[in-house]
Image: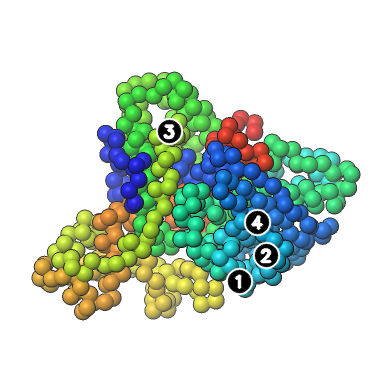
Amino acid sequence: MTEHADMKDFSACALRPPEQVMRLARLGSLHQCRLSFMRQLTRRLASEGWRFSRAAFEVDASGVGHAVYTATGPERSYSLIAFAHDLPDHLRSDRVIAEAWDATFALFDGVPDRDDIARLSRNVPVQEAGRISESELSLSRANRSVRLWTHVVDRLATGQQPDPDVITEVGYLMRTTAVYGSGKFGAADREVIADRPEMAAPFQAEMLSVYLTRWFVRDMVEHMARVQGGENAVALDPALARRLGIGNSTGLGMAPFLVNHPMLVNNWILVRETALARVRALPSATASEIALFRDLLTRSANAVQRWRTEHPLQLARLADLRADLARVLPHVAEGLDADHPWDTLLAWAEGSLSLEGQELLVSLMLEPYGDIIDGLGPCMAAVEQAGFRIDGSMPLNQVKTMIEQQFPWALETDWTAPEATARAWYVSEEKLEPRLGQRHEEPIAPYEQPLAPGHDAALLHADLGDWPGDTPLAAFLLKHPEHRHSARRVQIAAKAPYGEIRDNTIGADMLPIDMLRAKLSFFGATSFDPRSDRWIRITMFAGAPYPPELTEDNADFWVYPEAGA
């Protein structure tokens, strides 16, 4: 991680070890927190006084056309260019292989002119089949939640507000099926924007795109209600509108991210753990800090009661979480004025609560302390090329020691057991997207991707065998080039210990949704709803003020619903 003033450790509390934090079950229990990328975005937009405008809304009565939404900050502007389409129901699909959508988007670096819009109108609606340029920072698409969309349009068209219970049940009018950035399909590479303060934290361009998309979706549903109802139509009540987020359907394509970006993931987790250590080290808490914590805890309990899912695993986790909250609420009614209250509270939680409850409590413990935490946000980025070069001069005895330190669980695993290698990751020929197959049932082993670092580290350790310990790694790799990727990961893990999942990513009991949720929690997603063990639906920006309403007073705790809101 790059050196940063806010990363200097001034705490007396040790960080939780990677062996505890980087287990899949815990990663799959993470919740959003004040370091989540959505909340970093809204805080900055508000504190810097960004201005927002709808520069164009040229959509016809059939719901076809384009709109432009611009965010203007201290130094530059960014514009969402949205294209609305009249999509037949039979073409609406959340699958990555879909070829048509209800709406498509590009985040433009600056303010587009007519030529830019014309160029993008030929490319953005076809997504992968088109081509964007370095003037664009992201490419995305979204589909309607047909049931809620129809309900809201019908109600608004007749002068009525939608049913709040229906809004709570669904949570979004549109859901994205992909938000591409960082050079994909011709978009600007990350390096183009990495030095801009507003883009220093990860995924800020993508989060801005989704935030502006939510504004467009509200405008679209009100437009279609006016088309249908004419003078009888009314606007969506602002309180109900704020409850609506942008949905997202995320599948296996995102799961390998945590394996393929060890330095970046290390920084995400390390920053969160550093923030937690700072809070745990505090010798006391003020009355206002305790009051805020208790208020957000109560509001979190409200959010958990609204959380809907049909997946058996998440239903069981939700039951545990609700039981945890029933224990936590009376436990923290008193006692937070004790010595080192947050360290004491976490110790109690680790012995009393499920992983869901522990990690929700961790998120809540950070909330009162933006003054010692928020400056860590830019440290969550990473220059991953810095770890790409292998140190070939390293002696093999040091390599073996590093494997034994970083991958002890892998060395203890019986890799000859069929269940230990039951899965294999590969890339589909049709869409070049990650897939997960059954190794012992399908002929996919020849196409396997290197997404099992523990297994590969164990193979490297075994092949080091009786090689003399003072042999340089380069000499070994000349004889065994198949271990280059594993040797690189072992060296990265020594510098970035939170970058490695401490579990078997090809085992029979591995749940890809744990990897999906871990990444999405850092985005700031809520309402995790697994639809199988390998794809999940979530909601983004639910509860957030819309851009024209954004102020410093409402820019942060919007993620915790007020009672009745």
Residue type highlighted by circle 2? Asp
Q: Position of residue 157 (x, y in %)?
A: 84, 46
Quickly name the residue at label 1.
131
Q: Secondary structure at mark 3?
A: helix
Q: Label 3 crowding class (10 Å Cα cut-off): few <14, some 14-19, many 20+?
A: few
Lower position in the chain sequence, tag 1 or tag 3: 1
Residue type highlighted by circle 1? Arg
Lower position in the chain sequence, tag 2 or tag 3: 2
Q: Label 4 crowding class (10 Å Cα cut-off): few <14, some 14-19, many 20+?
A: some
Q: CA distance from mark 4 to mark 1?
A: 19 Å
Q: Residue at x 45, y 68 (%)?
A: 436
Q: Position of residue 511 (x, y in %)?
A: 43, 57
Q: Nearer the viewer, residue 328 or 80?
A: 80
Q: CA distance from mark 2 to mark 3?
A: 41 Å
Asked whether the residues under the numbered discs 2 and 1 touch, taking CB atoms below 8 Å apart as contact, a structural biologist would say: no
Quickly name the residue at label 2.
116
Quickly name the residue at label 3.
371
| Picture layout, residue 132 above or below residue 280 | below
- Asked if residue 310 shows in the view, the reply is no
